[in-house]
Amino acid sequence: SQKIEQNSEALNIQEGKTATLTCNYTNYSPAYLQWYRQDPGRGPVFLLLIRENEKEKRKERLKVTFDTTLKQSLFHITASQPADSATYLCAAQNSGNTPLVFGKGTRLSVIA
Amino acid sequence: NAGVTQTPKFQVLKTGQSMTLQCAQDMNHNSMYWYRQDPGMGLRLIYYSASEGTTDKGEVPNGYNVSRLNKREFSLRLESAAPSQTSVYFCASSTTGSNQPQHFGDGTRLSIL
């Protein structure tokens, strides 16, 4: 079955460092990957989308990569801040308006 | 802008009771979704509606029914609640097509005793 795996359940990082979160997929060749942020007690909020023919996408301090050979996406937050502490979800989608498949998320804690 | 609104925010039910969770969006989106989120399981799709008048099963549809009442509203019904349906339920909406981001409500926390 199609699987989206976010390898780390939790990640602690010091303020100012770059946080790197990993999303791997198996039995799957998604056309798109999306990343969401979820704060406690709130719904997920969309951050970035990357297509399979894009190697990298940036938005302010965020960067996402998509490596179809490794079947992996990396999500980077540079110059991390305590306000970046949240759970980050990876989601994959085939083309053709098929539903998103979500990973279980990685809880990031940025320590001052 | 309200975005996606879910009601109620919290609910406690007894086993066997029925309940309808309401969801409305004001973004003129065609597609709407219902997910459940459980610790260690992530977000799992229950049902979705690609457009008004259509509904499709997701990964975990058993024990649930849905109604796409109109373009704005998509409800989720538990006919006979079971403790295994204790979860946080999220509604989301998006424009039609692949590569569209989804907009989520803040969830309904449902406990079934």
Image (tube, coloured by chain):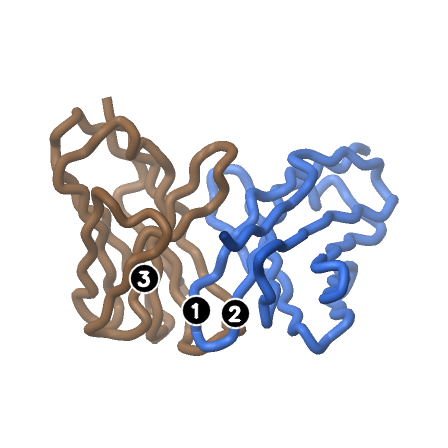
Mark 2, secondary structure of its residue: loop
Are discs 2 and 1 less than 8 Å apart at CB? yes
Report the Cα–Cα distance between label 2 and label 1.
Answer: 6 Å
Disc 3: which residue:
B48
Depth check, mark 2 against mark 3: the one in front is: 2
Q: For residue A29, what is the image quadrant?
A: bottom right
Q: Secondary structure at mark 1?
A: loop
Circle number at residue A22 = none
Give percent across and percent down for residue A70: 76, 59
Left/right placement of residue B44 relative to residue A18 reads left
Answer few, some or many: residues within 10 Å of disc 3's Cα (few below 14, many 20 plus, some between 14 and 19): many
Label 2 Cα crowd, 10 Å radius (few <14 / some 14-19 / many 20+): some
Subunit ID for the residue under disc 1: A
Q: Are marks 1 and 3 on the same chain?
A: no
SS of the residue under disc 3: strand
Provide the chain ID for the residue under circle 2.
Answer: A
Image coordinates of residue B103 in percent, x first then y, are: 45, 61
B6 to the left or right of A8 = left
- What color does chain B have in the rendering? brown
Residue position for label 1: A98
Quadrant occupied by the C terminus of chain B: top left
Say what amino acid the circle numbered 3 marks: Tyr
Amino acid carrying mark 2 in the image: Asn
Chain letter of the blue region:
A
Compared with A62, B86 (above or below) is above
**Which residue position holds label 2?**
A94
Circles 2 and 1 on the same subunit: yes
Q: CA distance from mark 2 to mark 3?
A: 16 Å
Mark 1 crowdedness (10 Å alpha carbons): few <14, some 14-19, many ≥20: few
Residue B72, position in %: x, y?
A: 26, 68
